[in-house]
Amino acid sequence: MAHVQRAPARRGSRAQEPDFWELRLYVTGQTPNCVRAFANLKDLCETHLAGKYRIEVIDLLRKPQLARGDQIVAIPTLVRNLPVPVRRIIGNLSDTERVLVGLDLIARKV
């Protein structure tokens, strides 16, 4: 089995945090799960990234061709483009701790 090594997680030092976060949320219309994902993302960003983020919402019902570029296979999906590396989180983003770990805002608990 291959071993994947990750960079060390940041431990809350404000000096190491990126200046700007570019997030893209893929949805399919106004389904309850997609609406919930946007609301959860907005709350999380206001709490943890206030003034340092941009959310782009892409409705795949209107622009399905955009799914290929970010390799979207499920909806809703959040893609963190900045800071690099790119990260993807699938679901309605209701598990705040999982989302924070997935975005690399907090370290994974061992």
Image (tube, helix red, strand yellow):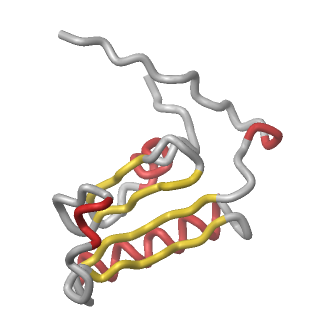
The location of residue 9, given as percent across then percent down, is 58, 28
- Looking at the rendering, which quadrant does residue 38 occupy? bottom left
Between 63 and 43, the residue placed more toward the observer is 63
- Looking at the rendering, which quadrant does residue 53 occupy? bottom right
- Looking at the rendering, which quadrant does residue 54 occupy? bottom right
The residue shown at (70%, 64%) is 52
| 106 vs 83: above or below | above
Q: Is residue 109 left or right of residue 67?
A: right
| 86 vs 94: above or below | above
Between 23 and 36, the residue placed more toward the observer is 23
* Quadrant holding the N terminus: top left
The residue most toward the right is 15
* Quadrant holding the C terminus: top left
Q: Is residue 90 left or right of residue 13?
A: left
The residue shown at (40%, 58%) is 79
Q: Is residue 74 left or right of residue 22?
A: left
The residue shown at (23%, 62%) is 68
Between 37 and 70, the residue placed more toward the observer is 70
How many discs mark residues in the rendered view? 0
Q: Is residue 74 left or right of residue 109?
A: left
The location of residue 72, given as percent across then percent down, is 23, 60
The location of residue 45, given as percent across then percent down, is 58, 66
The residue shown at (41%, 78%) is 57
Between 86 and 101, the residue placed more toward the observer is 86
The location of residue 44, given as percent across then percent down, is 54, 64
